[in-house]
Image (cartoon, rainbow, N blue to C red):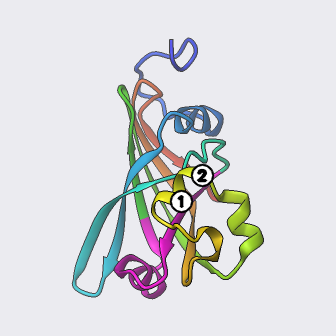
Amino acid sequence: MLFGNKTDHDDPPTREELARAMADMDLCIMVTREDDGMCSRPMSNNAQVDWDGDNWFFSNGDTRKVAQLRAHPAVTLDFQSKDSWISLRGRATLHQGDKALFRQHWTKDLDRWFPEGIDTPGLTLIQVSAQEAEAWGRIGNGSIDLKG
């Protein structure tokens, strides 16, 4: 069994169960806000699977999503595995020019999108700190308060 002895039930997962499930969920849909509506796009955690409540994403600094997050830092991340779904709601923090932090989250696969590595002009690291999660499926069903 993927998540220990747990089977589908109506109880929400614990924070620890949520973290274990997140280890299998790299790709997500990031939903941001514009003045006139919502926008969504696929994003990768860049194999940062040791989930502690924060998700990390690299981006060019001149993108629409970075402008949206600068204006409206509330964000939703929707993840899916073969038998579970997790929606995280949180706040984004934009990190620019912090090469030490970039190194901590850099993986070789990122060279495909950022050939100059952490020296890419305008490189931005998006940190999404989850405040609430909602889960469905094998790990349980319900909301989890992640503040604190």
- Residue farthest to the left, as pictured: 36
Q: Which residues are magenta?
A: 53-75
Q: Residue shown at 45%/29% (left/top)?
A: 140
Can residue 82 be seen in this snapshot? yes
Label 1 sits on a secondary structure element that is: helix
Q: Amino acid at mark 2?
A: Lys
Number of marks in the rendered image: 2
Q: Is 147 displayed left or right of 45 in the figure? A: right
The Cα–Cα distance between marks 2 and 1, rounded to whole angstroms, is 6 Å
Q: Residues within 10 Å of mark 1 (few under 14, many from 20)?
A: few
Q: Residues within 10 Å of mark 2 (few under 14, many from 20)?
A: few
Q: Is 148 displayed left or right of 124 in the figure? A: right
Can residue 148 be seen in this snapshot? no
Image quadrant where one finds the C terminus? bottom right
Picture disc at residue 111: 1
Label 2 sits on a secondary structure element that is: helix
Q: Residue shown at 22%/85% (left/top)?
A: 36
Picture disc at residue 108: 2
Residue 108 coordinates in the image, percent (x, y): 60, 51
Q: Is residue 70 magenta?
A: yes
Q: Residue shown at 73%/59% (left/top)?
A: 104
Residue 134 coordinates in the image, percent (x, y): 43, 46
